[in-house]
Image (cartoon, rainbow, N blue to C red):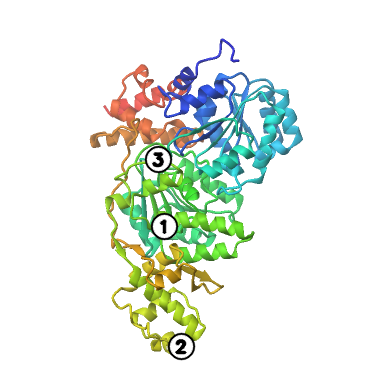
């Protein structure tokens, strides 16, 4: 039971966070947790998951304990809360003994509203003793997908979190994640003993993100064109599969005059911290990274996420692309995808550790990702379908804006499959894509002559298609499971499904790669991100400059002061008094007192 003096959740939302109303299922979750109930919450990145535990922590007596794997970001998370007037702290390995003692004392004295902990700290007996000496309002388990073995970011320390309920049975728990299939959701609930909890699944749709997947053709140059034509000066993340590719991509972009930084686990910890800090605090920084970067990044104005290599799963892809456009403003999710990606991923699965069932599950993840890449339907429809949700074609992805053609690729498939079959049967040989394409197109290379492959009956049967078109055919045969990658040299072999195609019993529909995809900026749809007239752009930029100077002075990321969406609304409505400024979304009581006069002075300077 809450005390009669407890503030109402809506009053906290308005006074502290500056929002007039909850969005989507937030209110349902908040009221349930405030009343002492457990919850498992799935909301997309930018959907407002944090408010689902921050508001109850301020309503319920005691301290909300947030379990998060994001040690490198805890300081920024705490800074953002303190800017709102929330008493927040953290305990992790980055602190010195004095800092740790100060935080522990504040907790025991009831002077913390929220306390952030890494999951491994809960395995330290002294931490459990400390928590037992104070009053806990709730436990929030953030990034809860980390508990799932088949999720995309498994963390063993999360497995011990089910013990929280046994030690503190009367303290409500809320587990939150931005992505999970029904199977992953079931596993999270079982591992965290939340089977009987309230399960809330919001829509996974991010309408402000434009999903685009381009045929790979010199991907760094393609990326550069994207940045120069659509995202000049914007902050963004570029994901690469290898550390080497991360560094080479960052060097390439930097040589083109773009502020680009590398981030991967092989870099010195101080370098990673410095690069992450610059990305969070400076405008227009592009971070080139492996997937180790980005989880929990609260930077709201990431305008694009680009993948130069194929993600291993749809869940991973969704989580990574979701780091764009957290503020609801137009953003781009762009992926360059080609034949080599499919070959590489198939090979990695074959060589992966684990039993046959493990490799089968990895293959299922990849097949779903390939289906998303090869679809001729709306990307958003396909993406949401993977998570068990339905929607209408969005009109804001590449397949909606430039509908791809499909064609009957059965004869082309038979030509490639027949070439693989004849090489194996007649010569006991196997080769990779390049050589197979040389055979069917009738190209007389030194290798063709060396092996006398111009004597094969299939030599030259595919002169009707260009080399890029044949590479697309081979890619789609791999994606459809009609070809398999084998051995260290990544040569091709037939599969069990190949026979039906060769016998003409199974048609092979294929997607025709567009020659050039339309360049169309993503469009936003959020009601709290109003369109801003072009004549107000100078006002907006002046507000951004004020925000940047204030953030630098205080040593915090700019978004801790105000989000872009809030500055846009300020520029559009041009409040003349503190009272008027206080009605704008994102301007809470503490921020109004702290920054209100600075905003008004900045607006006045434009008059």
Q: How far apart are marks 3 and 1 (CA)?
A: 31 Å
Q: In the rendering, at what x and y percent does residue 253 appear?
A: 41, 57
Q: How crowded is mark 1: few (under 14 residues within 10 Å), some or many (20 or more)?
A: many
At a point 40% along the width and 74% down the height, the residue shown is 416
Relative to residue 192, is residue 27 depicted above or below?
A: above
Q: Quadrant of the C terminus?
A: top left
Q: Quadrant of the N terminus?
A: top right
| Residue beneath disc 2 | 451
Label 2 close to label 3 by CB (< 8 Å): no
Query: What is the quadrant of residue 439 in the picture?
Result: bottom left
Does residue 361 appear anywhere in the picture?
Answer: yes
Relative to residue 147, is residue 175 depicted above or below?
A: above
Q: Distance between the residues labelled 2 and 3?
A: 53 Å
Q: Between residues 509 and 13, which one lies in front from this camera angle? A: 509
Label 1 close to label 2 by CB (< 8 Å): no
Q: Between residues 33 and 17, which one lies in front from this camera angle? A: 33
| Residue beneath disc 3 | 205
Task: Judge depth for marks 1 and 2 and give the one in front.
Answer: 2
């Amino acid at each position: 039971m809450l005390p009669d003096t407890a503030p109402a959740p809506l009053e906290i939302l308005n006074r502290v966070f500056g929002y007039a109303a909850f969005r989507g299922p937030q209110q349902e979750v908040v009221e349930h947790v405030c009343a002492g109930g457990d919850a498992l919450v799935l909301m997309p990145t930018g959907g407002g998951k944090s408010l689902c535990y921050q508001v109850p922590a301020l309503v319920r007596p005691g301290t909300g304990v947030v379990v998060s794997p994001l040690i490198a970001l805890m300081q920024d998370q705490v800074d953002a809360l303190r800017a709102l007037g929330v008493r927040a702290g953290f305990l992790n390995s980055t602190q010195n003994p004095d800092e740790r003692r100060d935080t522990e004392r504040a907790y025991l004295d009831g002077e913390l509203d929220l306390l952030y902990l890494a999951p491994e700290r809960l395995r330290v007996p002294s931490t459990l003793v400390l928590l037992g000496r104070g009053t806990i309002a709730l436990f929030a388990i953030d990034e809860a997908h980390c508990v799932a073995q088949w999720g995309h970011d498994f963390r063993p320390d999360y497995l011990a979190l089910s013990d929280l309920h046994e030690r503190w049975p009367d303290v409500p728990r809320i587990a939150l994640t931005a992505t999970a299939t029904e199977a992953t959701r079931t596993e999270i609930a079982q591992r965290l003993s939340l089977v009987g909890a309230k399960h809330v699944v919001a829509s996974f749709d991010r309408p402000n993100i434009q999903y685009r997947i381009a045929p790979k053709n010199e991907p760094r140059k393609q990326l550069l064109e994207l940045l120069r034509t659509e995202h000049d000066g914007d902050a963004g993340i570029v994901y690469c599969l290898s550390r080497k590719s991360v560094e080479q991509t960052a060097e390439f972009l930097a040589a083109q005059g773009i502020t680009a930084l590398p981030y991967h686990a092989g870099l010195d910890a101080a370098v990673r911290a410095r690069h992450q800090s610059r990305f969070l605090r400076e405008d227009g920084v592009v971070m080139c990274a492996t997937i180790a970067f980005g989880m929990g990044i609260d930077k709201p104005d990431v305008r694009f996420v680009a993948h130069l290599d194929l993600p291993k799963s749809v869940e991973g892809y969704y989580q990574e692309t979701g780091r764009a456009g957290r503020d609801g403003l137009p953003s781009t999710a762009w992926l360059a995808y080609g034949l080599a990606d499919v070959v590489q991923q198939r090979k990695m699965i074959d060589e992966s550790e684990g039993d046959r069932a493990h490799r089968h599950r990895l293959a299922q993840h990849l097949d779903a990702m390939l289906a998303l890449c090869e679809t001729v339907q709306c990307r958003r429809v396909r993406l949401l379908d993977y998570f068990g949700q339905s929607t209408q074609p969005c009109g804001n992805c590449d397949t909606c804006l430039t509908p791809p053609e499909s064609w009957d690729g059965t004869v082309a498939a038979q030509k490639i499959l027949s070439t693989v079959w004849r090489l194996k049967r007649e010569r006991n040989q196997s080769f990779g894509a390049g050589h197979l394409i040389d055979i069917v197109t009738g190209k007389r290379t030194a290798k063709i002559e060396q092996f006398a492959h111009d004597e094969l009956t299939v030599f030259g049967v595919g002169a009707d298609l260009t080399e890029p078109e044949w590479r697309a055919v081979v890619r789609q045969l791999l994606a459809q499971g009609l070809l398999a990658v084998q051995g260290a040299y990544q040569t091709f072999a037939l599969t069990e499904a190949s026979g039906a195609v060769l016998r003409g019993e199974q048609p092979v529909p294929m997607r025709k790669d567009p020659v050039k995809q339309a360049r169309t900026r993503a469009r936003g749809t959020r009601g709290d991100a109003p369109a801003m007239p072009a004549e107000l752009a100078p006002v907006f930029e002046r507000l951004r400059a004020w925000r940047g100077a204030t953030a630098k002075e205080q040593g915090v990321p700019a978004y801790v002061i105000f989000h872009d969406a809030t500055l846009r609304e300020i520029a559009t409505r041009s409040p003349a008094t503190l009272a008027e400024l206080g009605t704008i979304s994102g301007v809470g009581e503490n921020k109004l007192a702290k920054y209100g006069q600075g905003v008004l002075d900045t607006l006045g300077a434009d008059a």
